[in-house]
């Protein structure tokens, strides 16, 4: 697995350098996805963006990332994980520079799409490098350290983003990525060993990649354009038709491909299918919450960017402190109960969030809802991750993780496009308080309903016990850790 190097020990100096490089590299993509939401009101005012422009600022990045993240892991396995990781970091830095300098909304969205491509290359590589570089006995410890440090970064990201927007400009949240990326490249070039999978497929599922991107892109564009153009506009109808056709073609391509990106037979497993259905519904709700919550706090409630940025910090802290215990509880009593109760607790928090309006108080209006929402996510996410990864045999461990990661990203992507429309946005603006407030309230109510739907799916499809897979776990998973951890707190905000 490692080319030209011996495996690394966790306590060695080189091990610490490798950990530093992978933590900083993955944090580029994780934190950026969080802080951009904080900057949306400022971006809208500065560039004169309408609601669709702000939606595409988020979804341009999410679309290219969701479409290509499985390809990024495959490229690393074949051509070298360090090489693809460094290419991704470089690509991400250049795209971040373009974002920070973008003079128009159209150029910013284009740069965000490019940024997502870089994220799709670097995100799978970070964990794959850890798993391939450290000796077997130290891998779990290295991944745990990566998870904890990544969680801290995720907690500090909104604070940093709010401060940069308030003290300087929204452009700084992109420009700060450039020096961080330069440090990652320096550390990686000098200390990270190269590794690849000699058994990796030599042919990529091009048909699956293209049809999947067309399907997601068509639906995203159609639903985003719907409020301004109307449901009968030819552009909307054609986009939605192309999106549906693309997803149908994706299923057919995966069924016929000798080396599919997503082997459809894995969905024959009831627990795996159920876990991914719950993931889709819950992360759709999360996508709506994280898109509109901080915008509402600034535009409607009058919070500063910094105050809005740290408003959700208790949720992250709760998950960092309690996610490991939640995972242990799920192992002891089985995943069905926590995966049913967790979304219901989240839904209760969202009903409280829906009431946040003008002149809201953080202590009495925001904090209680954020704490309840965080407790619900803590109850849910660790058992959900464990079920998605543990319901297939070891040979499919990497595929299970990659598919679950892609499902979560696709759900958030579609939620940002569809929920404002479903909440009655019409041709209104997301930066005008009177127009945003009813849209925000309705969106939170819809998201609470989605959480309740996730609870029902979990109760019906998730078994009380997941059969334990083979003891010999795969360490080729390119997309997420093999065990639930504090890193889930960061993943929630993507």
Image: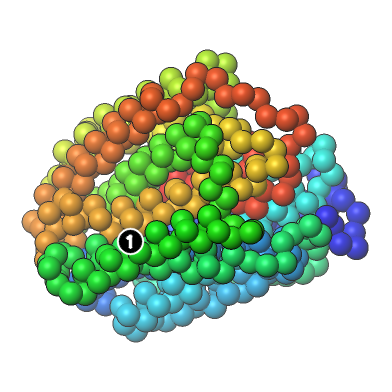
The x, y position of residue 441, in whole percent, is: 16, 45
Q: Is residue 160 left or right of residue 300?
A: right
What secondary structure is found at the residue carrying circle 1? helix
The x, y position of residue 237, in whole percent, is: 21, 68
Q: Foreground: 172 or 320?
A: 320
Q: Is residue 439 left or right of residue 137?
A: left
Q: Residues within 10 Å of mark 1 (few under 14, many from 20)?
A: some
**Residue shown at 57% from the left, 16% from the top:** 332
The x, y position of residue 358, in whole percent, is: 13, 47
Q: Foreground: 456 or 367?
A: 456
**Residue shown at 58% from the left, 21% from the top:** 331
Residue 142 seen in the figure:
no
Q: Foreground: 281 or 61?
A: 281
**Residue shown at 46% from the left, 56% from the top:** 251
Residue lying farthest front?
Answer: 256
Color style of the picture: rainbow
Residue 133 seen in the figure:
yes
Q: Quarter holding the N terminus?
A: bottom right
Q: Is residue 137 left or right of residue 33?
A: right
Q: Foreground: 188 or 398?
A: 398
**Residue shown at 65% from the left, 43% from the top:** 396
From the viewer's perspective, is residue 11 above or below residue 198? above
The x, y position of residue 205, in whole percent, is: 59, 65
Residue 162 occupies quadrant = bottom left
Residue lying farthest bottom?
Answer: 103
State how many labels appear: 1
* Residue at image mark 1: 244
From the viewer's perspective, is residue 250 above or below residue 210? above
């Amino acid at each position: 697995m490692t080319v030209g190097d011996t495996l690394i020990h966790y306590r060695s100096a080189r091990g610490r350098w490798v950990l530093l490089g992978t933590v900083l590299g993955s944090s580029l993509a994780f934190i950026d996805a969080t802080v951009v939401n904080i900057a949306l009101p400022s971006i809208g005012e500065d560039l004169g963006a309408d609601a669709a422009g702000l939606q595409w600022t988020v979804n341009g990045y999410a679309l290219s990332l969701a479409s290509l993240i499985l390809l990024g892991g495959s490229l690393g396995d074949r051509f070298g994980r360090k090489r693809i990781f460094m290419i991704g970091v470089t690509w991400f830095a250049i795209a971040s520079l373009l974002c920070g300098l973008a003079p128009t909304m159209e150029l910013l969205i284009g740069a965000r799409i490019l940024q997502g491509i870089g994220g799709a290359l670097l995100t799978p590589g970070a964990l794959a490098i850890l798993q391939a570089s450290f000796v077997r006995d130290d891998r779990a410890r290295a991944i745990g350290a990566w998870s904890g440090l990544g969680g801290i970064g995720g907690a500090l990201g909104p604070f940093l983003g709010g401060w940069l927007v308030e003290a300087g400009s929204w452009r700084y949240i992109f420009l700060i990525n450039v020096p961080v990326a330069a440090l990652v490249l320096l550390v990686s070039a000098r200390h990270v060993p190269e590794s690849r999978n000699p058994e990796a497929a030599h042919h990529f599922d091009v048909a699956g990649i293209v049809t999947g991107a067309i399907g997601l892109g068509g639906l995203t564009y159609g639903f985003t354009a719907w409020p301004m153009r109307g449901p009968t506009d030819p552009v909307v109808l054609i986009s939605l038709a192309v999106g549906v056709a693309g997803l149908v073609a994706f299923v057919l391509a995966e069924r016929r491909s000798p080396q599919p990106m997503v082997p459809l037979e894995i969905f024959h497993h009831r627990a795996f299918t159920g876990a991914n259905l719950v993931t889709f519904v819950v992360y759709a709700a999360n996508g709506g919450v994280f898109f509109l919550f901080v915008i509402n706090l600034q535009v409607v409630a009058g919070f500063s960017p910094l105050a809005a940025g740290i408003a959700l910090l208790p949720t992250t802290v709760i998950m960092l402190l309690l996610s490991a215990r939640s995972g242990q509880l799920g192992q002891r009593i089985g995943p069905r109960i926590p995966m049913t109760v967790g979304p219901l607790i989240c839904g209760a928090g969202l009903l409280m969030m829906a009431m946040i309006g003008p002149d809201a108080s953080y202590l009495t209006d925001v904090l209680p809802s954020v704490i309840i929402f965080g407790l619900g996510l803590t109850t849910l996410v660790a058992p959900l991750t464990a079920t998605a990864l543990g319901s297939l045999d070891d040979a499919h461990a990497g595929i299970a993780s990659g598919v679950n990661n892609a499902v979560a990203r696709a759900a958030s992507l579609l939620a940002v496009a569809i929920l404002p429309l479903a909440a009655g946005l019409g041709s209104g603006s997301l930066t005008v308080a009177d127009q945003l407030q009813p849209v925000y309230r309705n969106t939170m109510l819809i998201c609470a309903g989605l959480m309740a739907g996730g609870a029902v799916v979990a109760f019906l499809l998730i078994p009380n016990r997941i059969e334990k897979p083979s003891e010999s776990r795969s360490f080729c998973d390119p997309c997420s850790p093999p065990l639930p951890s504090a890193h889930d707190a960061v993943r929630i905000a993507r």
